[in-house]
Image (spheres, rainbow, N blue to C red):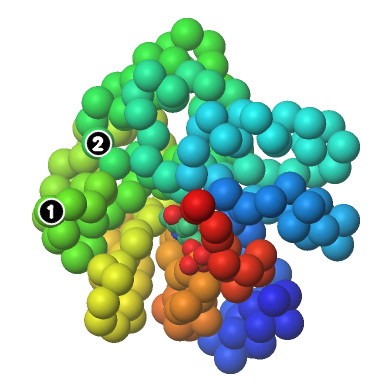
Amino acid sequence: MTTRIRTAESRAGRSPGSVTLIAVSKVQPDDRVRAVLDAGHRAFGENYVQEAQGKWPVWRAQYPGVSLHMIGPLQSNKARVAAGLFDAIHTLDRMSLARKLAGLAADGVVLPDLFVQVNTGDEPQKAGVLADELPGFLSACADLGLSPQGLMCIPPEAGDPIPHFRLLRSLAADHGLPQLSMGMSADFEAAIAEGATHVRVGSAIFGARDYG
Ligand SMILES: *Cc1c(COP(=O)(O)O)cnc(C)c1O
């Protein structure tokens, strides 16, 4: 996997190591995750606060240097726990969550790095701020004292993801945001070519997820 990342970086004229590979370990059996930790990988992504809370405190203690990324929808009532558990939240997708996070910061909680999730495909069932609404959302975040470092998207399942990666990149450039969380198992190389700084790769590292 690292070789594929390095090749994609070099093809895109990006420096080696400029892309963070987030190994998405949600729902994966512990032995598969441990194998990746033992191999030296340290950046992981989880979708569910409760699942992450159940396994990562122990692994963090055993494997120094882990960085943990929240990539799933975050309920406001889990924001405090998430802020303590994760180094980055990629799914800041609505004002109520922004207000909740700002309130935690006011209480002295050190917030993780924040990415705003953008619903680039305008999909009604999908979370995320619409592209049209992003400027207003970001300025409201700034008013609350939040300073997101980047944008995140999950392109529609069908169709070409590249226009979505390009849209995300141009939105980030418009707002001077340096980080781009985009690209999954099926399309992370294309995402790197379009400027991803963080790719979220699950099944291509761990094998298929078994939700049974
Ligand atoms: C599960 C998940 C991934 C990883 O998906 P794969 O196709 O297994 O690489 C990436 N991003 C998000 C937001 C996810 O929920």
Can residue 143 be spotted in the picture?
no
Q: Is residue 100 above or below residue 196?
A: above
Q: Is residue 101 left or right of residue 127?
A: right
Q: Residue at x 44, y 24 (%)?
A: 79
The CA distance from mark 2 to mark 1 is: 14 Å
* In this view, the mark in front (2 or 1): 1
Q: Position of residue 38 (x, y in %)?
A: 87, 56
Q: Is residue 30 above or below residue 98?
A: below
In which image quadrant can residue 21 be found? bottom right
Q: Secondary structure at mark 2?
A: loop
Q: Position of residue 70 (x, y in %)?
A: 51, 42
Identify the residue position indicated by label 1 in the image: 124
- The amino acid type, in three-letter code, at marker 1 is Pro
Q: Is residue 113 left or right of residue 157?
A: right
In which image quadrant can residue 145 be found? top left
Q: Position of residue 158 (x, y in %)?
A: 26, 77
Identify the residue position indicated by label 2 in the image: 94
- Are there few (<14), some (14-19), or many (20+) residues within 10 Å of tag 1? few
- The amino acid type, in three-letter code, at marker 2 is Arg
Q: Residue at x 14, y 48 (%)?
A: 133
Q: Position of residue 5 (x, y in %)?
A: 64, 78
Q: Is residue 48 above or below residue 176?
A: above
Query: 8 or 127: nearer the eye?
Result: 127
| Residue 207, numbered label | none
Instruction: Confirm or deny contact between disc 2 and disc 1 (CB under 8 A).
Output: no
Q: Residue at x 69, y 51 (%)?
A: 29
Q: Residue at x 59, y 24 (%)?
A: 84
Q: Quadrant of the N terminus?
A: bottom right
Can residue 147 be spotted in the picture?
yes
| Mark before the other along the chain sequence, 2 or 1 | 2
